Image (cartoon, rainbow, N blue to C red):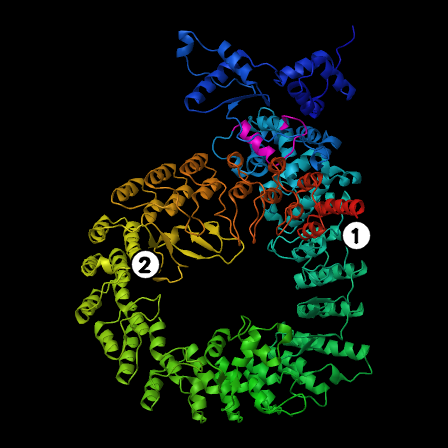
Amino acid sequence: MPPPRAGPSNTEWNRHKALIRRRYLVDEVSLKELFEELVQKGLTLTLKQLEHQLRDWKFLRNIPSSGWQYAGHRIDKRRVAGKESLVVFNGKRVKPSTVKKETNRNRLVTYAAASAPSPSTPPDLALSVCTPPSLPLEFEWQSNLPWLSFQRNYPQLFSVMAGSQMRTHPTSISGDNMSIQYLHSTASNHILSQDLLRGDTNVMQIATGIAREMPESFSGEHLISAEILTRDSSQDVATYYQECTKLLFFRMSNCLDSAEPNDTKLGTIMKLLGGSGSLHAPLDPASQDDPTIASVLERLFGQFLDCCTLDLSETDKFLPGNALDIFKWILSSGFGPNTPVTDRNVHPGDSFRCITPLQYALSYGAFGAALSLVNAGADLNGASPRCPWTPLQLFIKRFPEDFPTPDGLSKLDFVEQLIKSGAQADAHADWFGYRFSPLTFAVSTGDIALVDLLVRNGADIDYRTRLTSHPFREYDTIMSQCAGNGTDESTTLRMVDYMLGAFQSQFPDRPIDSVITTDVMMAAAAMGYANVIQLLRSRVTNLDFYSNRTRGSALHVAALYNRVELCTLLLQWGHPIDGDGAVGPDRPDGPVRNKYPTPLHIACLRGNSDLVQLFTSHGADIKEIWNVESQFLHILSSSSLSWSPSEKLIQYLASPHSPCETLFREIYSHYKNVIPIQLALAADCHQREASLPCTTILDNAGASFPKDALYYAIRGSGHLFHTLIESGFDPNVQQGDHGSMSLFDFLLEDKTIKKEKREAYLVFLLARGAKPTSRNLVDAIELGTSWSLIKQMLNCGASLRAHGVSSKTPLEVALICGHDEIIEHLFEEFPSLAYDPSVLCAAVKGALVASSSSRIWVEHILHNRVEELLTAEEFRVEGAALAIAVRHKDWTMINLLTRFISIIPSTAILPLSVSQWKTTDPPKELGVLGRTWIDHSPGGWSSGGSRFWKSPQRWDCFIGSPIAPAVYMGDISFVERLLSRGFCPDMLSLSMAARKDWLSMARLLVSAMKLPQSLPGYGGTDPLQWAISRQNGDMFDLLKDFGLDIRSKAYITKDSGRSYLQTAVNDGSLGMINRLLESGANVNERPAYRAGATSLQIAAMRGFLGIAQLLISRGANVNARGSRTTLERAAEHGRIDMIQLLINHGAKTTGRAIDLAKKEGHFVAARMVERYWVYQTKTTG
């Protein structure tokens, strides 16, 4: 008798498991047909072995009695809760008639059975009772979609990976809980979107969520996937692993998932690739013609290049292997080493995000990846618009120190290897008008050996580039870079000496004067290198101290950088003290001269008393005028390339690179022309030098004080301040040439001055004729100034009126701050003060925030109220007072206000922040409409600003019912109490309830409201939009039944916004999409002018393939215009299956989609569109 035939191995069974499941359970072929089909595929087995394996896998076509008892019990419980039920068995829906028949037949009817515990879920039975999908996405998909073509061409790939994983790493998959967690996190957190996993997620929800993004290769595939993902993964690890891998690959191929270098998602990918054994051999190059495989490789290439830039200690936390191995495997599979990658450190909206892989590797220190790219044939001289530097320049720039590579090569060896491999030593790169070369970066390292290596290999030592931002220098050359080397002076001396020798060797016929220019001298002066300047002076016979255009000199630069010793030497060597060198045709004298500062101006600006003393002792002109205003105004309206030398100096001094930025910004904000003593005063006071050293030196030299010297004297020297006042200086003088600030303004705005000192100065100025303003009075009260001084200011002309339309009056400030003494005296001194709702708001705010004793002032103010004299706007302001009380939930104050205000205002100015929307992407906490938004963050209701009720433009306040703050706080009993007192809700209140998902609050408000009102016209006030965004179906139904129009365009404006359907599509909310479509929403609603998109364009952008197919089936226009067409949006985001779907439905392109895809690094998507574009051009002409 022959021995029994050996059956297939576990690996072989797992390889065919998905096929067997589909054919036996979904297609319901007979056992014999299935057996014959497997034999044809080369599987050696018997019919009995197949039957045994089906039982082992629990592949049952019929639900056992225990299963029907469980299903019947679940259906009954759900019916009591008002829920519909759908039964899913082995990934297939069971007909309702079958469910009704079998649950009735297997129902527990005996007393013993009825009193027994509820039946539990049958073990190892793929049975689920869930809610039917609100919008089933089941379509006949075109077979040419990349994902479906990939599954046909590589049907065994995922089975092979699962089988290899079980074979090569059985412990890590079946026994290691950490590995199971990896897979589970992949399925729940990374493969599936988070919004699909809210609440009690069931099989049907998961299936519908997958269908939202992914096509089916056969009907019911997503249900099978969902059933596997919701099952206990430890029961069948190989199948679970296979399903995770499939979903992960689809999302990667369509760029639906992002993975950072330090992310567990990449750890999951490492497990999939490493466990499958795929890294042991390169991929078949032919497989890269498949768009799905090519797109996955494209994603992996960029992601693992990112990983290679991290330290091993960082990647080990997330990746269970070496990322460089996978990177090398991708290159060995034929992936192009010059395929651009996106720089993850660049903002997604940047026009130039792509750089070459070799540039990226060298920019972030991935030497292993860089060597692999070089060996794979990467372009050693390739650059990109984002990064114009060549790989050689990047390496020298990125690693100025002698940093050894992982292969043990020194920096010098690595550079030499790059040059031998084809890198050009004389390559130049332009960056915003500045020219760089490898030699530029080599000189900055101070490594003469590296410089010599580049010079010997053809580096250009005779180029120059115009400097657009340096305050004095005109050109930068290799010699000036050597002279200004920032290492140390001895190294710089050797570098300069070497470069002079190299120049004479290469250009023996040229005079050395042509390379030693004034720019070279200034570069050395900036570093304070006196010996370098002495060396350069010794090599030339006739050195002009001034450059031809900038009128700057080594003395200017030395003064700017506080090089006192060098300035002394330069003057000893005959350097002109005031910049009055020889005047020629390139150096116009006269009126133009005051556009340029003298070295004394710069010394004063720096506050260096040693330099001021040095220059004045050498006869510097202490009356020289430097004009600054005209230069700065021109700079604001021109580009850096058109700046004159004097304008370039202004820009530099006011930039963050300047050593005196803060002080200079103060100078040019107040003055048109400055003399040295003004700069000295400003610098001394800025540095808190009480002795005023620079000012004293100039004063002793005979300089005259400017008329506004009081401002700086009051900061630095009380003695000088009193001296100047007593000598006749005007106490009402305005600061600077623009007259922007009085002494009173300065004293009251500078919070660093102590209270006693401030009040003493104020009394002193009042006694000498100073005239305070209403604004000064307000500032004084805010600072807690005594009543006696306030009265003096009133006697000297200060007014109790507001100094501006939206400004506070002195009385309002006193009430807000709770200064009872000032309030009492003001009411006593001015009994005729009329009733003002703004004053009432201030009193309520002060009583609730500053001092509870101020409640008496609220009642005092209300006694003067005459309702018949109030305007509609004043009623709104009174509503603001009520809103403040409601915000603080103070019933005592509410009762006091309503005792005098008998009719509660329906609208009020609310303490809610509203502002103009000036950015493309508003903060998440903002509801956006048009160009304004309402701040829903907690800080938006904290106080609303100290004068929110007085804003004439309403940009920092909001109009709505006074009950709105109570709704925002969510206290439903408090809201009920306010409603009983006559407060009326409005659409703003309703929108707040909808935003917070407070259904009971919304019902209460709707019951108290009349017909739907119009929206106030601000973002964040559409309750229906919030219901859709929160995916709250009950809230949506409530608002719809209340009468809100689903087809309203209130939320979409000319500038920005989303229609209701566009919002639901953007969120991927299938339930809301279904409700809106059933209510007649327009699938072709126009997009907003700015940042707008149609519903189909949004689906394409988000990668919602199923939703896109649904919208197309409902008549969506695939060629609708906007800022992007639908095809352009899909290409820009790398959605390759979406691209093919749109092409199948007649999408048109002009080639712009290709550029958009390439800009974002989606080259597979770009090739797909390009092939279609070529075909479209040929067929249509």
The residue beneath circle 1 is 377
Up/down of 705 relative to 483, above or below: below
Name which quarter of the figure residue 533 lies in: bottom right
Name which quarter of the figure residue 799 lies in: bottom left
Is residue 1011 rendered to the left or right of residue 174? left
Residue 637, horizontal then vertical, whole percent: 57, 73
The residue beneath circle 2 is 873
The answer to whether residue 212 is magenta is yes
Secondary element type, mark 1: loop
Tell me the kind of residue under disc 2: Glu
Residues at discs 2 and 1 in contact (Cβ within 8 Å): no
Few, some or many C-alpha atoms within 10 Å of disc 2 (few <14, some 14-19, many ≥20)?
A: few
Name which quarter of the figure residue 49 lies in: top right
State the residue lying farthest toward the right: 509
* Nearer to the camera, 1057 or 1049: 1049
Up/down of 751 relative to 281, above or below: below
Sequence-first disc among 2 and 1: 1
The answer to whether residue 1181 is magenta is no
Residue 1168, horizontal then vertical, whole percent: 73, 44
| Residue stretch rendered in magenta on the structure | 202-221
Spatial separation of the CA atoms under disc 2 and disc 1: 75 Å
